[in-house]
Image (spheres, helix red, strand yellow):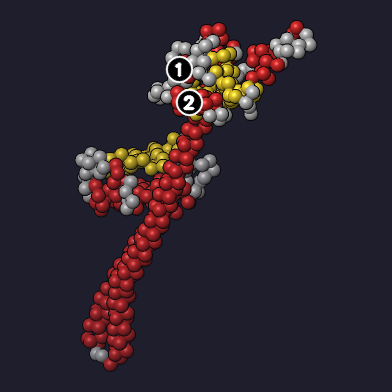
């Protein structure tokens, strides 16, 4: 857009009333944008009140002032802005209009504000006479844009964090699943070995004794009375030995079944099962036990939650047995309201906190996954030389009783 200088003042030449005698002046006064004109030397020819106010002056103070030196002399960072690089002046030097929203204007008090401005050459009789510049303070726009950019950056950062957390969690779940499968296979192998080595050998011995008795009974008719009496003594010994083998087999079967699922959990409930497991553990590990359980009138949890709590408790004790090298074990079980808190503490060697967060800490991962499944949490406090404290916190849903 190019404006002829005569056109700028022609509006004032044909007034219809006194109120409209100077329509251009009315336009300049009514707009909220700053508007000023400069000649070929960059000196201010006119400026409206809005423009003068934005840079801290009265319009009359700016007549004949170099507008670049006054309000466009420096970049936003304070660096010098050469006049030969100024797009405003290029509008009349090279006849190039421009629209810029990445620079600042400077106020009278030395402060700056982000501005969007446009500069258009003024042409009179084919000659460039200067330029008209319009500008507006875009501080709020910049602030909103910066806030939007920060929000976008924060959102991207959160998305990256969540993506990393999900990837890490997925990796841990896969590792835990692989570890669980390996443990399951190890348990199957152990049970098969025990059945083969212990029950198998007992049953073979029983079979041999039964075959021996069958053979001797078939020979009984041809023996003398004294030999028969002697044989009965032998058979009585065999029967007693078979009885002992059967009792041992029954004990082994009971132990294997208890390892797979303690019958006390089904018959007497979770609280009795926890105390039984603690007593069994300290007796086997030769530890002193400080036992405390406060579950006044607490209902027995339903089977899935009860089994999860019991397995978590077993894993806590297993950690003490494998790693703690402790002499004392404290167990504290409290039900308050609808919340269960189960704490296992030892006076062993302890470990740094990161040891419980390691990728190979499958026992801890398994406990936490069991707890999370029921909305619970596992909290671990430990330090080298200061023992370890593991605490399970889980809610007991109303009506969740066996």
Dividing the picture into quadrants, the one containing residue 336 is top left
Q: Are marks 1 and 2 in contact (CB under 8 Å)?
A: no
Q: Which residue is at 20% across, 40% downward?
A: 385
Q: Which residue is at 67% across, 18% downward?
A: 6
Q: Which numbered disc flags the more N-terminal residue, 1 or 2?
A: 1
Tell me the quarter of the image containing the N terminus.
Answer: top right
Q: Position of residue 209 (x, y in %)?
A: 29, 79
Residue 61 visible in rendering:
yes
Secondary element at image label 2:
loop
Label 2: few (<14), some or many (≥20) within 10 Å? Answer: few
Real-space CA distance between mark 1 and mark 2, rounded to the nearest whole angstrom:
11 Å
Q: Say which of 289 and 116 sits in front.
A: 116
Q: Position of residue 23 (x, y in %)?
A: 71, 14
Q: Which residue is mark 1?
A: 69
Secondary element at image label 1:
helix
- For residue 86, the mark is 2
Q: Position of residue 229 (x, y in %)?
A: 24, 83
Q: Which residue is at 45% across, 26% downward?
A: 84
Q: Is residue 137 left or right of residue 284?
A: right
Dividing the picture into quadrants, the one containing residue 4 is top right
């Amino acid at each position: 857009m190019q404006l002829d200088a005569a056109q700028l003042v022609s509006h004032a030449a044909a007034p219809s009333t006194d109120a409209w005698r100077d329509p251009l002046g009315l336009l300049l006064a009514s707009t909220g944008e700053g508007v000023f004109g400069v000649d070929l030397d960059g000196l201010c020819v006119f400026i409206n009140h809005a423009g003068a106010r934005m840079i801290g002056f009265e319009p009359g103070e700016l007549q004949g002032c170099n507008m670049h030196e006054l309000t466009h002399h420096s970049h936003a960072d304070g660096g010098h802005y050469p006049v030969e690089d100024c797009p405003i002046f290029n509008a009349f030097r090279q006849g190039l209009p421009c629209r810029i929203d990445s620079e600042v204007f400077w106020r009278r008090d030395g402060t700056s504000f982000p501005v969007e401005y446009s500069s258009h050459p003024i042409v009179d009789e084919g000659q460039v006479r200067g330029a008209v510049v319009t500008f507006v303070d875009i501080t709020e726009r910049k602030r909103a844009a910066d806030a939007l950019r920060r929000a976008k950056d924060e959102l991207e950062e959160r998305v990256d964090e969540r993506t990393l957390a999900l990837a890490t969690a997925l990796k841990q779940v896969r590792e835990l699943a692989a570890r669980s499968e390996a443990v399951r296979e190890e348990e199957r192998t152990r049970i098969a070995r025990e059945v083969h080595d212990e029950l198998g050998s007992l049953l073979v011995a029983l079979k041999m004794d039964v075959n021996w008795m069958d053979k001797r009974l078939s020979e009984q008719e041809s023996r003398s009375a004294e030999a028969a009496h002697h044989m009965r003594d032998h058979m009585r010994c065999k029967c007693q030995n078979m009885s002992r083998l059967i009792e041992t087999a029954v004990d082994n079967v009971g132990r294997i079944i208890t390892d797979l699922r303690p019958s006390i959990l089904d018959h007497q409930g979770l609280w009795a099962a926890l105390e039984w497991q603690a007593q069994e553990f300290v007796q086997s590990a030769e530890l002193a036990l400080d036992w405390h359980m406060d579950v006044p009138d607490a209902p027995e949890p339903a089977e899935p939650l009860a089994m999860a709590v019991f397995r978590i408790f077993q894993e806590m004790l297993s950690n003490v047995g494998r790693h703690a090298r402790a002499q004392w074990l404290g167990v504290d079980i409290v039900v308050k309201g609808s919340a269960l808190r189960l704490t296992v503490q030892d006076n062993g060697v302890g470990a740094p906190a990161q040891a419980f967060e390691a990728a190979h800490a499958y026992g801890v991962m398994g406990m936490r996954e069991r707890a999370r499944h029921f909305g619970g949490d596992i909290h671990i406090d430990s330090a080298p030389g200061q023992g370890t404290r593991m605490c399970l916190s889980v809610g007991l849903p109303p009506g969740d009783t066996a």
